[in-house]
Image: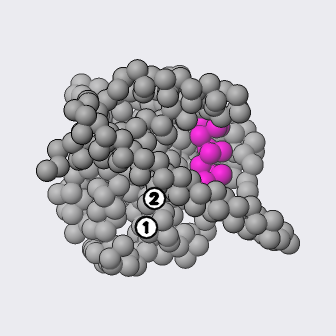
């Protein structure tokens, strides 16, 4: 990035609740005072130190449950007093910010719809200017890394340093088992561009179904995410919003105890073997690049030949034959045929692009 952002690592946030991984849990929506306090008490019993609950719920369409509003902040305060847990909630505008700060909310997060609106983000950043409160930014609804980074930059420019990101997946028209497709490469790229930023995974919104939470959580941990935000309800099936993706506190505890925690560099373990294997991968990658270069040189020669002989660029039968052969070879050597098909489709598109340039050149 052109400007280095002043973002503190999670370990420097000064939170007693900074476990590894960081766990934030609680109801999708605060519904009643009893429900919020009951959730907090049960989560505290399982060692959870940060309670989350939606107070204002921006919904896609009106006339659905849009949160209890400011009264829910009083319930969060009561839960904090009862358990000693930190409390967190979503803010979508300046009014939410002021009310949450007045109620003593410890951690704020900004939802996906708000992240997609630079005007709203700037107003929130201005309202938080100079404060030291942690703010987590969910990815925008659509897979737009620049928009996500822009929201983080606006908060950083306002003087905030305790800024984190929440990966909650992306909307898609394609049929998928997920509510929001993960597209893991996008948060990975975010971490590459802003190395110090903590990234929390929200498997509840990615999966949309409680049976997907375990695998999604493990995937996030394997990718070195800093924590998880999981929706928990005393009686999930009776929840007023997003009932299918919530679990009970006991189910959350079972999920967390089954996670396999790995380290980038375990103590006492030599990385020599790993480095040797990575070197071999680098050599393979170099070879792939050289082979693609040779292939494109041939593609250019073919393009010139087609132009000289007034032939069409796309030879459908030839392409069908290539697809069939590559899939057969993939099956023979235990490579995923879909993976191989995508690679060759991309190569084919670039080949057509090069030949089109040749055909249209003087």
Residue 38, image x, y percentages: 57, 39
Tell whether 187 sits left or right of 146.
right
Mark 1 to mark 2: distance in Å? 6 Å
List the residue tagged with mark 2. Answer: 189
Q: Nearer the viewer, residue 173 or 196?
A: 173
Prevalent SS, magenta region? helix
- Quick one: 111 or 99, which is closer to the camera? 111
Front residue of this view, candidates 91 and 309: 309
Return the residue at label 1.
193
Q: Which residues are magenta?
A: 213-227
Work out whether 157 lies above or below 55.
below
Categorize mark 2 by other alpha carbons within 10 Å: few (<14), some (14-19), many (20+). Answer: few
Rendered view: 95 above or below 208: below
Q: Is residue 220 magenta?
A: yes
Tell me the SS state at disc 2: helix
Q: Residue at x 50, y 71 (%)?
A: 196
Residue located at (78% from left, 69% from top):
271
Q: Position of residue 197 (x, y in %)?
A: 47, 67
Q: Is residue 206 magenta?
A: no
Quarter location, residue 360 = top left
Q: Which color scheme is applied?
A: one colour
Does dot 1 land on a helix, a strand or a loop? helix
Query: Is the N terminus in the top left, top right, bottom left or bottom right quadrant?
Result: bottom left
Q: Residues within 10 Å of mark 1 (few under 14, many from 20)?
A: few
Labels 1 and 2 touching (C-beta < 8 A): yes
Percent of width and height locating residue 132: 40, 74
């Amino acid at each position: 990035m052109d400007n280095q952002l002043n973002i503190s690592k999670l370990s420097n946030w000064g939170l007693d609740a900074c476990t590894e991984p960081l766990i934030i849990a609680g109801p999708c929506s605060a519904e009643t005072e009893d429900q919020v306090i009951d959730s907090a008490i049960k989560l505290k019993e399982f060692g959870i130190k940060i309670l989350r609950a939606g107070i204002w719920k921006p919904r896609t369409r009106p006339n659905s449950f849009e949160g209890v509003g400011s009264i829910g902040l009083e319930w969060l305060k009561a839960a904090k007093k009862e358990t000693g847990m930190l409390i967190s909630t979503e803010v979508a505008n300046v009014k939410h910010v002021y009310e949450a700060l007045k109620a003593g909310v410890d951690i704020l997060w900004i939802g996906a719809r708000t992240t997609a609106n630079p005007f709203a983000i700037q107003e929130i950043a201005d309202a938080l200017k100079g404060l030291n409160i942690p703010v987590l930014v969910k990815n925008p609804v659509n897979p737009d890394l620049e928009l996500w980074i822009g929201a983080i930059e606006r908060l950083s420019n306002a003087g905030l340093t305790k800024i984190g990101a929440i990966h909650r997946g992306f909307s898609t028209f394609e049929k998928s088992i997920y509510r929001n497709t993960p597209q893991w490469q996008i948060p990975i790229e975010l971490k590459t561009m802003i190395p110090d930023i903590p990234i929390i995974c929200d498997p509840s919104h990615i999966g949309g179904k409680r049976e997907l939470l375990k695998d999604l959580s493990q995937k996030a941990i394997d990718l070195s995410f800093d924590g998880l935000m999981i929706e928990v309800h005393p009686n999930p099936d009776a929840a007023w919003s997003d009932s299918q993706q919530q679990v009970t506190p006991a189910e959350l505890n079972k999920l967390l105890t089954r996670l396999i925690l790995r380290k980038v560099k375990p103590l006492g373990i030599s990385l020599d073997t790993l480095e040797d294997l990575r070197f071999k991968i680098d050599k393979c990658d170099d070879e792939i690049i050289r082979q693609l270069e040779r292939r494109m040189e041939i593609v250019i020669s073919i393009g010139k030949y087609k132009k000289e002989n007034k032939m069409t660029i796309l030879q459908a039968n030839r392409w069908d034959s290539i697809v069939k052969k590559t899939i057969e070879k993939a099956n023979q050597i235990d490579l995923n045929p879909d993976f191989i098909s995508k690679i060759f489709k991309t190569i084919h598109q670039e080949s057509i692009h090069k030949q089109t340039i040749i055909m249209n050149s003087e």
